[in-house]
Image (spheres, rainbow, N blue to C red):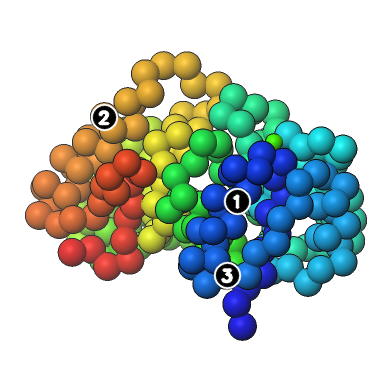
Amino acid sequence: MAARILIVEDEAKIARFVELELLHEGYAADKAGDGRTGLEMALRGSYDLILLDVMLPGLNGLEVLRRLRAESDVPVIMLTARDAVMDKVSGLDMGANDYITKPFAIEELLARIRAALRGGGGASKAGEALRCGALCLDPARHTVTYNGEDVSLTYKEFLLLQTLLENRDIVLGRDTLLERVWGFDYLGETNVVDVYIRYLRQKLDEKYGVKLIHTVRGVGYVVKGDPA
Ligand code: CA
């Protein structure tokens, strides 16, 4: 049966756009235009996932999440504004499974929805080695090897590769990578992600003649399950 998704979003155009995309993907979707209605529907309806905007009239998204979590562990993906650092941190603290920054690419939202429905959210168990073909990243020992050969990465290169491997098969947007690797408060060049992707490709893809890191035009980057 199709997964049922509730969209709690007061901006009608965004809600409608997301609804159409979800229906197109074969999901069942309902909409709520304010926090109070959203909370009631989330508690009463049997939803498999809630997309929850933070800035909502009536009851804001964080308050909806807090009340929802008192009664339900349904997966929740928060929709947050780009510069609303506290919302993201609070949302995750309060039990959101994931968040996506507005404006978002629909492909990234759909990938996050698939991950949340799988119960993954992408992240591996803490300390578990991440593998992709002959590549192995060991977070506990902070080492990367390819075919058993040590690959020397800088701290940020390591974090970037780790983030991509933890979210294998999920396309990550530049903003997402920027936040997860460089932090919410990063104020430098936004093309830093592309620059570091280039470094990683030099040290991995080009050196070993594989295609580990794929570019998804207009969206971001992804490491796929099986390297080509
Ligand atoms: Ca809003």
Q: Residue at x 77, y 41 (%)?
A: 61
Residue in the image at 61% along x and 83% along y: 1
Quarter of the rendering containing residue 120: bottom right
The residue nearer to you, when weighing 6 against 228, is 6
* 1 in relation to 129, above or below: below
> Considering depth in this image, is 29 or 172 the residue closer to the camera?
29
Q: Is residue 70 left or right of residue 16?
A: right
Query: In this orientation, does residue 120 appear?
Result: no
SS of the residue under disc 1: helix
76, above or below 185, in the image: below
Work out how far the residue at label 1 is from the one at label 2, CA to CA, in angstroms: 36 Å
Q: Which residue is mark 2?
A: 195
> Mark 2 belongs to which amino acid?
Val
Q: Which residue is mark 3?
A: 27
Inter-mark Cα distance, 3 to 2: 37 Å
The answer to whether mark 1 and mark 2 are in CB contact below 8 A is no
Q: Tag 2, which secondary structure?
A: helix
Question: In the rendered structure, which disc, 1 or 3, sits on the residue that comes first in sequence?
Answer: 1
Q: Earlier in the sequence, mark 3 or mark 2?
A: 3
Q: Quadrant of residue 126?
A: bottom right
| Crowd class of label 3 (few under 14; some 14 to 19; many from 20; radius 10 Å) | some
Give the label on residue 210, or none. none
Where residue 51 appears, x then y in whole percent? 66, 53
**Residue type marked 1:** Arg
Report the image quarter containing ligand 1: top right
Classify 10 Å Cα crowding around label 2: few (below 14), some (14-19), many (20 and above): few
Look at the numbered disc 3 and say if its residue's Cβ is closer than 8 Å to ligand 1. Answer: no
At 54% from the left edge and 58% from the top edge, which residue is drawn?
Answer: 20
- Mark 1, residues whose alpha carbon is within 10 Å: few (<14), some, or many (≥20)? some
Q: Which amino acid type is marked by label 3?
A: Tyr
Give the residue at mark 1.
Answer: 16
The answer to whether residue 64 of the structure is visible from this angle is yes
